[in-house]
Amino acid sequence: MSNKISVFDTTLRDGEQSPGCSMNLQEKLNVALQLEKLKVDVIEAGFAIASPGDFESVSEVAKVVKNAIVASLCRAAEKDIDRAYEAVKHAAHPRIHTFLATSPIHMQYKLKMSEEQVLERTAFAVAHAKKYCSDVEFSAEDASRSDKGFLAKVFTAAIAAGATVINVPDTVGYSTPAEMVEYITFLKNNVKGIEKAEISVHCHNDLGLAVSNSLASIKAGATQIECTINGIGERAGNASLEEIVMNLHTRKDYYGAECGVDASQIYRASKLIQTITGVPVAPSKAIVGNNAFAHEAGIHQHGVLAERTTYEIMRPQDIGIPQNKIVLGKHSGRHAFENRLTELGYSLSKQETEDAFYRFKVLADRKKNITDGDLDALVAMKFETVEQHYKLDNFVINSGSKITATATISLNVNGEIIEKVSSGDGPVDAAYKAINMILDKKIELDNYSIHAASEGEDALGEVVVRIKLDEKQTVGRGRSTDIIEASMLAYLDGVNKL
Ligand code: KIV
Ligand code: ZN
């Protein structure tokens, strides 16, 4: 009989903590709905006490999610726990996830607490959470650098106070697979009441071992895995959900474990996170990278054509990569358009389909072949829901190898057309300077990236910028067949968000 592994997704909490991956409320709700389609067991929706925005997103996610458990993270402090419950109480299946560090380094320098105090606080926090919620998870932060004997005492106290899940985080990505096995085995043998709780692991990827450490822990008896889509997260990220799930699917013979995730939703989930965060995965990324299923070498192609399993251990359709690459164009009708969206796994409302079809027609006037990549980009525009106070009205750019680039930009600012001219170090810089002049604001560009959202010579260029005004930071996205226009649209998207 195979073990059932719970998949705890923390894309909306730990994932969102990664640089440049912050999401607004609407984006978080879209991610939560995709996670439901993926059939993860737990959605960690945020850290409710961190800010009013975080609180709101946890409670809104709690309201829309029907099947998965919705968790909020909180420190082991009364106020934090109260706030976490306030946010998750709307959920069909709420969980409070409280944590306290247990390693000597963290206890001495960060918490300034003794072992006795940590033990006492653990019991208090879990008992307090338990007053609200039957499902309480306790995490021993930096567990993998903690003394095993002390860790066992802490988890014993947590379970005695009512914890239903005990989590072993490799907070700084320091552990090795063999050490994770040692920890889990030790805890199974030394934590009193361990049979009453689920054992979870939460591995970071600082040394590139997050997935290996998670899988080794499953082998040793962990039954909950904490992970994120595309492995996004603090620093080098968290264990990647898609890699763990596909390891369990592909090597069921080895792990003897399975999870309830619907693997055919993986590709869509990965694309959604890339679209929303503007952070693309590397082409060679396992499972969801563009090259993950591409066979370049002749000998491999020959083998795959003769018998797929010679070089393929998974099929692209297993993770939901659309198979028949239909190309749409100017003359494609609404029916073909809607059919293709459905085949690509989208389920849009009537209004969203209407809006996307309009954008499709506009694009088809500029671009002969509309590919799946273009459709992804067109649908992604629905996430750009901010009010457009500043709209691009017109632009003229002059640039060349022997002249200073200049940009004449006119914006529609709440109905009024304002035009400014600026020079700059290249066309994009000139355009951004002209926009800043219109806004009369010192917006700083922190990061700029551009890639082709689809294939072919007339591909849609997608620009993602991170911009800053005072202490506020945001990500803006823009797409166009003209990359200078895409650059301006991305900048204005960010400006409207700010
Ligand atoms: O990495 C970590 O230790 C965490 C815990 C708060 C679970 O994210
Ligand atoms: Zn973490």
Image (cartoon, grey):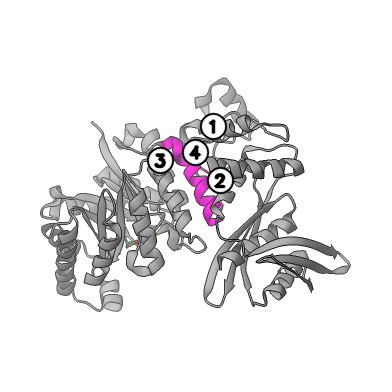
Q: Which residues are magenta?
A: 263-288
**Residue neighbourhood size for the residue with mark 2, other residues' Cα within 10 Å, grouped as few (<14), some (14–19), many (≥20):** few
Can you see residue 100?
no
Drawn side of residue 414 relative to residue 99, left or right: right
Q: Which residue is mark 4?
A: 347
Q: In the picture, residue 173 is in which quadrant? A: bottom left
Of the image marks 3 and 2, the number of the one nearer the N terminus? 3
Of the image marks 3 and 1, the number of the one nearer the N terminus? 3
Label annotation for residue 343? 1
State which mark lies toward you, 3 or 2. Answer: 3
Drawn side of residue 422 relative to residue 265, left or right: right
x then y, percent, for residue 297: 63, 34
Q: Distance between the Cα atoms at labels 4 and 2?
A: 29 Å
**Residue neighbourhood size for the residue with mark 3, other residues' Cα within 10 Å, grouped as few (<14), some (14–19), many (≥20):** some
Q: Amino acid at mark 1?
A: Glu
Q: Which residue is mark 2?
A: 284
Check disc 3 and report its element: helix, strand or loop.
helix
Q: Amino acid at mark 4?
A: Ser
Q: Residue drawn 59% across and 30% down?
A: 300
Label annotation for residue 37? 3
Of the image marks 3 and 4, the number of the one nearer the N terminus? 3
Q: Distance between the Cα atoms at labels 3 and 4?
A: 11 Å
x then y, percent, for residue 478: 64, 56
Give yes or no for contact between labels 4 and 2 (Cβ–Cβ under 8 Å). Answer: no
Q: Nearer the viewer, residue 213 or 366?
A: 366
